[in-house]
Image: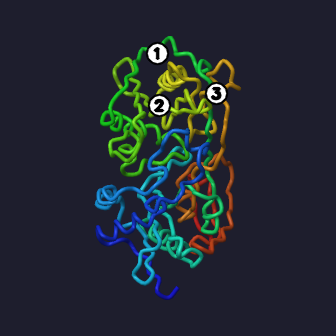
Amino acid sequence: MADLVVRPVASDEEAERFLRATPNGMGLPTWEPEPAAWWSGPGLGARFGGVPDAAWFLRERGSLPDRDRTQAAFVGGELVGTSGLLSLELTVPGPRTLPMGGVTWVGVHPTHRRQGLLRAMMRALLDDGHRRGEAVAALSASEGGIYGRFGFGPATTQVRWELSRGQGPARPASDGGRLALVGPEEAGAAWAALHEEARRTRVGEVSAYPGYWDTLAGRDESGRDASRLRVLHCDSAGRVDGGAAYRIPWSPLPEESGLVQVDWLEAVAPSAYTVLWSFLSDQDLTRRVAAGHRPVDEPLRWQLRDPRALRVTRLSDNLWVRLIDVGAALAARRYAISSTIVLEVADAFCPWNAGRWILDRSSAHRMWKHG
């Protein structure tokens, strides 16, 4: 397209136009309604349905994270495509962390689809990540058939599960800690610290994007419903070692009533993990607990008297990863190998990766390009 220009937004006015052109800003449907694996449903989520009001756009345009990493598509001066990278970190086997470009805000105006705008924006995003030395890019795909053509592939998996009340784990007799319901300020700060500690030990975990904890805790008034509850677990010394965000939404429908909806749970101590699930699975006047966006190897199953009681209701891909720099990405992680491995890489979209790469076991897992 001759008059297509792809570049970062350059002002607050363009930032607002950018936000209004994103799928969320246009009020378009979100990916997969309940029971999507990332949604514990059927309660309300952040801005499900409808267009954000004018006050939201004015507030958000001045704090658009990594604005210099946006890549907007302009056609004839009109902003009709959006995309961006967030400067994040990914935990890889070792465990180690490495810089990651988090692909976000991807959307093309309905009037300009099938005209090469997405390809042009992805080209700009990956070139930007390469210039900044990011070894990988990653995203959560709204549709499974979009990103494979650009070299992304599913790398982690998530599930949604349910558990009937009374079938949760027993609270450990040795736990000397305590639970406390707290407000959004205390919860947001504690949850951020918990995640920073936990993510560095879990392969496939990603650092939180700017504003995530404000949204989860309800500090930014982004439309989260009033039933949001926040709980912390402290050990016997008073240190926060676990936390959860959950809701008990009211519903007139019998099949949806009595649901404890867990939106997030993290713990850095096994006892805190068990206590939190024991607490959430035995709430008064409820019938079951549901949790979305959970790992496939959830330890909770093996803490139940009846492991079959944990019913997986949805399984889906989670993180899609693209190697921007094959050498740096593969050298950053550790391997359980006893010999040298040679990889033949063909990469039409990022041609600097193409060639023969050697994983040298004798050189501390060093990756180097041959020829």
Q: Which residue is mark 3?
A: 301
Label 1 SS: loop
The Cα–Cα distance between marks 3 and 2, rounded to whole angstroms, is 16 Å
Question: Within 10 Å of the Cα at label 2, are there few (<14), some (14-19), or many (20+) other Cα atoms?
Answer: many
Say which of marks 1 and 3 sits in front: 3
Q: Which percent across, then down, holds residue 155?
A: 62, 52
Amino acid at dot 3: Arg
**Residue contact between numbered discs 1 and 3, judged by CB atoms under 8 Å:** no
Q: Which mark is residue 267?
A: 2
Q: In the picture, residue 29 is in which quadrant? A: bottom right
Depicted 4 relative to depicted 187: above or below: below
Residue at 47% across, 82% down = 4
As helix, strand or loop, the secondary structure at mark 2 comes to: strand
Using a 10 Å C-alpha cutoff, classify the residue at mark 1 as few (fewer than 14 neighbours), some (14 to 19) or many (20 or more): few
- Is residue 320 depicted above or below 37 in this figure? below
Tell me if mark 3 has few (under 14), some (14-19) or many (20+) residues whose alpha carbon lies within 10 angstroms of its own: some
Disc nearer the start of the sequence (1/2): 1
- Cβ–Cβ below 8 Å for labels 1 and 2? no
Q: Quadrant of residue 322?
A: bottom right
Secondary element at image label 3: helix
Q: Which residue is mark 1?
A: 175
Left or right relative to 214: residue 202: right
Residue 182, percent across and down? 34, 28
The C terminus: image quadrant? bottom right
Residue found at x 52% / y 44%: 95
Q: Amino acid at mark 2?
A: Ala
Residue 91 spot, x, y in % from top left: 50, 47
Q: Amino acid at mark 1?
A: Asp
Dot placed on the residue nearer the N-terminal end, 1 or 3 = 1
In the depicted view, which residue is nearer to us: 75 or 333? Answer: 75
Which residue is found at the position 63% from the left and 36% from the top? 297
